């Protein structure tokens, strides 16, 4: 290979990426179109024709309540992501994160103990970690475990199920095990360095860095002093907030519409079926999951209709992946990988629920 | 050189993002400094809203300072429209009625037990997950005084509700006063109404409808109408239409119903 061969190939990859339509922009337009169609249907079906202002009131409260509750966590995640990007070098990441699959996954799964953030905050952090060279399966494990075992979620689960302490143990134990299992499966199924999504992400981020480098020369002065550093972190966090927030907001509106239109009584008709109830609760978690803290209380209301395993499946699946997170992940990862991730998480969650149901009660 | 031509003024994109951030900071500030925040999120989430507000203000200040810098021209992105979308819902939350949130969810009448689907009839039910302990003596340091009328207000509603449902037999004969919104189910002599409340754990989206079954009354009341009810406590049984199991829950024998113009308080919160 000639001396410049490898760099020329990488440059072609970069150039190809930079001239192609960015997945994020195309995705945003597609999602906006879907949202526009859905909104038009809801408007005609529930507002214009029956003049159901009550429905619109209910929908509006749901959308704004979720947005006001979750946006602070999204902002916190964006700030943490910016700090990692600007002040944590690739070498430091490599020193902290074990390189081997098993130890890396185990280390990532335990970081949630010290990070009081919900799932909305982890997606921008994960994106930055992958860009810094953390293996994809390690970063994904971190994303799945943090919403399960961070102190706030542990407390809310204990509060919601204080009469049934085993549910707290089930959620933490099976949740952690599920996150580790998904991480290990991803490392086995997909040799993370060969993931095309990872290369595209690197190329895109390198392209962004290429643009940012030029922008910095003429637009963003190098950080000087405390205020300069604050400005640099804030600017980068603001960009992350835009990238993640647009998908998050679409997810909030879509899940709010589904919650407002579909009566929850539909869930109860098959709640008593042992296997179907597990799948139903996983599907419900995908749509109904608001945040990992609130999930405990939502699951509590299903207790008399569903088995303990189905409740645990709900408590595990929702924080790991839901409609909002899927849309946020689509800003950084390809659809095929996201679909694989959803299927693997669903399988692990249903298996966890099945195992819980085998535990003798009493 | 990357990007388009250099310009001495910030592009539309930068101004738009500045206005979006300002809008979000302004809305968060409005919620924090008015009494509207708790119509959307639980009081325990206030600290996070404060953090979010402070962060947004910081974003706005830095963005404002950056507007003076030269920036290359950049295309307008469709994502900005998505950030504007939530503001379209704000006018519909000016006078929110928390009773409307329950229309799609049904009512949870026993934290340990079955949930009534408002579209189905009452049947006997037993909750397999309920604690199997016998009715226990009322603790002297509980949320309910050992004597006198039981009055539920915004601060003690959930604590008293839990105590009444945990040990319904211990409070038979006590007088009670509670307010909430109305739900009817059943017809004729078997028809009953529930005086309900929305219990908010984290935000309005996860609110659960709870309340008390009342003895039939001939008052002409509509669903979602707000009332204050006074009466005497008794017990009754009700059934889960899906599991066909029964449980014992508190019942209010109504002596007086006072219609209210609107909610005295929209939500109750876990203590």
Image (cartoon, coloured by chain):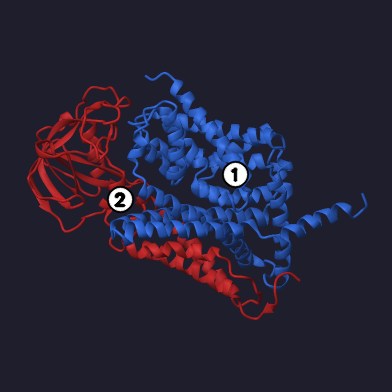
**Residue A259 placement (x, y as % from top left):** 38, 48
Q: Helix, strand, or loop for circle 2?
A: helix
- For label 2, the crowd category at 10 Å Cα-Cα, with few meaning under 14, some 14 to 19 and many 20 or more, is many
Chain of the residue where label 2 is placed in the rendered structure:
B
Instruction: Using the numbered discs, state the Cα–Cα distance from disc 2 to disc 1 in whole angstroms.
Output: 33 Å
At a point 20% along the width and 55% down the height, the residue shown is B264
Residue A329 position in % (x across, y down) = 58, 49
Please determine if labels 2 and 1 lie on a single subunit.
Answer: no
Q: Is residue A170 left or right of residue A191?
A: left
- What residue is disc 2 on? B101
* Nearer to the camera, A179 or A103: A179
Pointer 2 with pointer 1, Cβ within 8 A:
no
**Coordinates of residue A37 in the picture (x, y in percent):** 46, 58
Q: Is residue B156 visible?
A: no
Q: Secondary structure at mark 1?
A: helix
In the drawing, does residue B35 fall left or right of residue B124? right
Residue in view at x 23 percent, y 35 percent: B163
- Residue A176 vertical placement versus A214 (above, below): above
Tag of residue B20: none
Rendered-image quadrant of the C terminus of chain B = top left
Q: Chain of mark 1?
A: A
- Which color was chain A given? blue
**Quarter of the figure with residue B125:** top left
Viewer can see residue B107: yes
- Picture quarter with the N terminus of chain B: bottom right
Residue closest to the far right: A2
Chain B: its colour in the image is red
Q: Which mark is residue A338?
A: 1
Residue A217 image position (x, y, % from top left): 73, 70
Reply above or below: A307 against A19: above
């Amino acid at each position: 290979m000639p001396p410049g061969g490898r760099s020329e190939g990488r440059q072609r990859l970069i150039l190809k990426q930079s001239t192609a339509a960015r997945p994020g922009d195309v995705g945003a337009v597609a999602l906006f179109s879907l949202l526009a169609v859905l909104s038009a249907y809801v408007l005609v079906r529930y507002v214009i024709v029956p003049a159901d202002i009550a429905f619109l009131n209910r929908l509006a409260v749901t959308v704004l309540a979720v947005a006001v509750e979750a946006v602070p966590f999204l902002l916190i995640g964006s700030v943490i992501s910016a700090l990692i990007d600007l002040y944590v070098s690739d070498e430091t990441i490599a020193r902290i994160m074990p390189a081997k699959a098993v130890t890396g996954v185990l280390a990532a799964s335990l970081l949630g103990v010290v990070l009081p953030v919900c799932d909305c905050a982890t997606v921008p952090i994960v994106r930055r970690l992958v860009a810094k060279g953390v293996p994809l399966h390690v970063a994904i494990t971190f994303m799945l475990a943090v919403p399960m075992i961070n102190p706030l979620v542990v407390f809310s689960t204990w509060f919601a199920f204080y009469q049934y302490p085993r549910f707290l143990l089930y959620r933490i134990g099976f949740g952690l095990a599920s996150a580790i299992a998904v991480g290990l499966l991803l490392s086995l199924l997909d040799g993370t360095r060969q993931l095309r999504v990872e290369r595209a992400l690197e190329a895109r981020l390198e392209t962004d860095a290429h643009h940012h480098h030029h922008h910095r020369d003429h637009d963003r002065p190098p950080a000087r002093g405390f205020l300069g550093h604050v400005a640099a972190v804030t600017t980068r966090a603001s960009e992350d907030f835009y990238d993640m927030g647009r998908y998050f907001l679409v997810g909030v509106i879509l899940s709010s519409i589904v919650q407002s239109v579909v009566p929850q009584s539909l869930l109860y008709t098959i709640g008593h079926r042992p296997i179907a109830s597990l799948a139903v609760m996983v599907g419900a978690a995908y749509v109904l999951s608001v945040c990992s803290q609130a999930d405990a209380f939502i699951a509590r209301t299903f207790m008399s209709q569903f088995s303990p395993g189905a409740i645990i499946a709900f408590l595990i699946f929702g924080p790991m992946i839901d409609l909002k997170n899927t849309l946020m992940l689509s800003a950084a990862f390809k659809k095929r990988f996201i679909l694989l991730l959803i299927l693997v998480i669903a399988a692990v969650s249903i298996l966890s629920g099945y195992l819980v149901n085998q535990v003798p009660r009493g | 050189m990357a990007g388009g031509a250099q310009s001495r003024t910030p592009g539309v994109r930068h101004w738009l993002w500045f206005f979006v951030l300002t809008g979000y900071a302004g809305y968060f500030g409005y919620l924090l400094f008015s009494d509207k925040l708790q119509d959307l999120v639980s009081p325990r989430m206030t600290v996070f809203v404060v953090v979010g507000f402070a962060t947004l203000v910081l974003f706005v200040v830095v963005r404002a300072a950056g507007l003076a810098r030269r920036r290359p021209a950049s295309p307008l992105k469709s994502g900005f429209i998505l950030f504007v979308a939530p503001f379209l819902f704000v006018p519909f939350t000016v006078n929110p009625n928390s009773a409307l949130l329950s229309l799609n969810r049904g009512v949870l009448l026993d934290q340990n037990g079955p949930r009534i689907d408002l579209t189905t009839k009452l049947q006997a039910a037993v909750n397999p997950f309920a604690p199997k302990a016998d009715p226990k003596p009322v603790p002297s340091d509980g949320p309910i005084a050992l004597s006198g009328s039981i009055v539920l207000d915004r601060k003690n509603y959930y604590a008293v509700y839990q105590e009444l449902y945990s040990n319904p037999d211990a409070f038979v004969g006590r007088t009670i006063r509670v307010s909430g919104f109305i739900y009817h189910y059943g017809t004729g002599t078997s028809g009953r109404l529930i005086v309900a409340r929305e219990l908010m754990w984290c935000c309005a989206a996860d609110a659960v409808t709870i309340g008390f079954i009342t003895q039939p009354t001939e008052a002409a009341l509509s669903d979602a109408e707000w009332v204050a009810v006074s009466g005497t406590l008794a017990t009754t049984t009700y059934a889960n239409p899906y599991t066909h199991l029964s449980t014992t829950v508190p019942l209010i024998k109504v002596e007086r119903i006072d219609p209210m113009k609107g909610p005295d308080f929209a939500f109750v919160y876990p203590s």
